[in-house]
C-alpha cells in the first residue's frame, strides 16, 4: 500500500455572511483601533454571503487577489483596504508563519447591486487567510490554535467594523466598553428567524465611503444626542427580540435608521446616501402598512437600498405585494442566518508524486 505523505498543501475556504444592523454602528471613538462610538446590534443574514479561498504561495513575492473571477491589483488605491488588512493580520498573528497567499473571493449576491459587501468580504478574507496559515480543517480546530471566534471577529473588525458582527448566527451585539469593545452572540438564528427583503434602488457605488461618513458623524449637532439615546434603544431592542414583539421591534428599527440618516445628512460634509426615490418608497411602505397591506418595517445602511424586515410567515406575501406594486424594483430575499463556515481541501502528494484531493469538513 502506498503511504508516506511527502507534503501537504491545500486551500482554506471560508463562507461568511453579511449582517443587517438593527441598532446602527455610526461614528468611531478611535479610528486607529476601530472602536465604535456606540453599541450596535445586528441580524446575521443567510443568503448574502462571501466565499473566499486562500492557498499558500510558497515562493511568491506577494499576495494575489481575485474578486468575482477578476484579478485585482492589490496596490491599486481601490484595493488598499485589502492589502492593509492582510498586513494587519500578519502583524497581529506574530508567532504564526504567514506566507503570501493566492486569494479568490466571490460575493453570492449580484455584483454591484449596492449591497454592502464589506462585512462579509472582510470576514471571509480574515477566516480564509487564517485557515490557510494554520491549515485548520474547521472553525472548531482554529479554536484549538488559540483562534477562537471572538479573536477572529476582532481581527475582522480591524478591516471593517461591521465584519466583526458576522462571526455568529442570529443576533449579535457589538458593545463599546470604555476605550475598547467586545463582540458576542445574543440570540441564535432559530430563536426568532426574521425575513429581510432587500429592495435594490440603486446599483451605483456609494460616493462617500462609510469610513469617511463615520469620521464626519462627529460634526453633526444630532450626533451627541443620538449617542445618549443608544443605551435605552439597546435595552428596548433586546427585550423586543427576547419577547418576539415584532411590531415594537419594527417601530424601533425604522426610527433608528432615520436617526442615523439624520446624523449623516446634518454632518459636515454631509453624507447623503438616500435620494428622493428612497424617501418616496419609505413613505409608501409606511402608508401601505397603515392600510394593513404590508406587515413589514424598513431599515437602511449607508446606501439607498431598503431592507424590509418582516416575520418569515409573511415573507412570500410581502414579496408578492412588492413585485406587483413596484415591478421596476429588484428584490433579494434573505433571512436570519447561522453564521460562518470554514473547510479545508488538501492536495496530498504520495511517494509517486501523484496527488489526490481530500475535502476537510464542510
Ligand atoms: C451604516 O463597517 O462599513 O452599515 O468600519 O469604516 O469599514 P468601516 O465601516 P462599516 O460601517 C457600516 C455602517 C452601517 C451600520 C452598521 O452596519 O452598523
Image (cartoon, grey):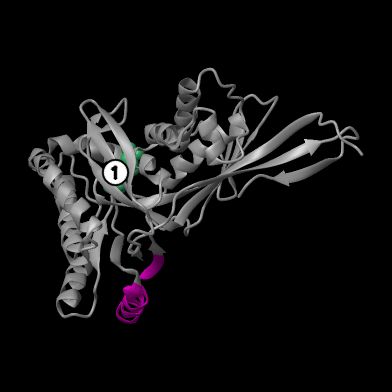
Beta carbon at label 1 within 8 Å of ligand 1: no
x, y percentage for residue 233?
14, 49
Front residue of 37/214: it is 37
The residue segment tinted magenta is 313-333
Does residue 66 appear in the picture of this structure? yes
Front residue of 284/350: it is 350
Q: Is residue 250 above or below residue 118?
A: below
Q: Residues within 10 Å of mark 1 (few under 14, many from 20)?
A: many
Residue drawn where x is 45% and y is 25% of the image: 88
User: Residue under circle 1?
Assistant: 173
Give the quarter of the image for residue 122: top left
Q: Quadrant of ligand 1?
A: top left
Residue drawn where x is 29% and y is 43% of the image: 173
Front residue of 200/354: it is 354
Q: Main secondary structure of the magenta part?
A: helix
x, y percentage for residue 344?
64, 42
Amino acid at each position: 500500500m502506498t503511504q508516506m505523505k511527502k507534503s501537504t498543501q491545500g486551500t482554506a475556504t471560508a463562507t461568511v455572511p453579511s449582517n443587517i444592523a438593527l441598532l446602527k454602528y455610526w461614528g468611531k471613538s478611535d479610528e486607529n483601533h476601530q472602536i465604535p462610538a456606540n453599541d450596535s446590534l445586528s441580524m446575521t443574514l443567510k443568503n448574502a454571503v462571501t466565499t473566499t479561498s486562500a492557498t499558500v504561495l510558497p515562493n511568491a513575492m506577494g499576495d494575489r487577489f481575485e474578486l468575482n473571477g477578476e484579478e485585482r491589483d492589490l496596490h491599486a488605491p481601490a484595493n488598499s483596504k485589502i492589502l492593509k488588512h492582510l498586513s494587519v493580520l500578519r502583524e497581529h498573528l506574530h508567532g504564526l508563519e504567514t506566507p503570501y497567499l493566492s486569494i479568490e473571493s466571490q460575493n453570492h449576491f449580484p455584483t454591484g447591486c449596492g449591497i454592502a459587501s464589506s462585512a462579509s468580504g472582510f470576514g471571509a478574507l480574515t477566516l480564509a487567510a487564517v485557515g490557510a496559515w494554520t491549515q485548520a480543517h474547521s472553525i472548531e480546530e482554529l479554536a484549538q490554535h488559540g483562534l477562537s471566534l471572538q479573536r477572529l471577529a476582532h481581527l475582522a473588525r480591524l478591516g471593517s467594523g461591521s465584519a466583526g458582527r458576522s462571526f455568529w448566527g442570529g443576533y449579535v451585539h457589538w458593545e463599546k466598553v470604555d476605550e475598547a469593545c467586545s463582540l458576542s452572540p445574543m440570540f441564535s438564528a432559530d430563536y426568532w428567524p426574521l425575513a429581510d427583503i432587500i429592495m435594490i434602488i440603486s446599483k451605483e457605488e456609494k460616493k462617500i465611503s462609510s469610513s469617511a461618513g463615520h469620521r464626519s458623524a462627529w460634526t453633526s449637532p444630532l450626533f451627541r444626542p443620538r449617542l445618549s439615546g443608544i443605551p435605552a434603544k439597546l435595552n428596548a431592542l433586546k427585550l423586543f427580540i427576547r419577547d418576539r414583539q415584532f411590531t415594537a421591534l419594527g417601530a424601533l428599527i425604522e426610527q433608528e435608521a432615520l436617526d442615523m440618516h439624520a446624523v449623516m445628512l446634518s454632518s459636515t460634509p454631509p453624507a447623503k446616501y438616500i435620494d428622493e426615490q428612497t424617501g418616496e418608497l419609505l413613505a409608501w411602505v409606511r402608508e401601505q402598512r397603515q392600510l394593513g397591506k404590508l406587515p413589514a418595517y424598513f431599515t437602511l445602511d449607508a446606501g439607498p437600498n431598503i431592507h424590509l424586515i418582516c416575520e418569515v410567515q409573511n415573507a412570500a406575501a410581502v414579496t408578492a405585494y412588492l413585485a406587483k406594486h413596484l415591478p421596476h424594483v429588484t428584490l433579494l430575499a434573505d433571512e436570519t442566518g447561522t453564521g460562518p463556515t470554514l473547510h479545508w481541501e488538501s492536495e496530498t502528494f504520495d511517494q509517486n508524486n501523484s496527488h489526490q484531493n481530500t475535502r476537510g469538513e464542510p
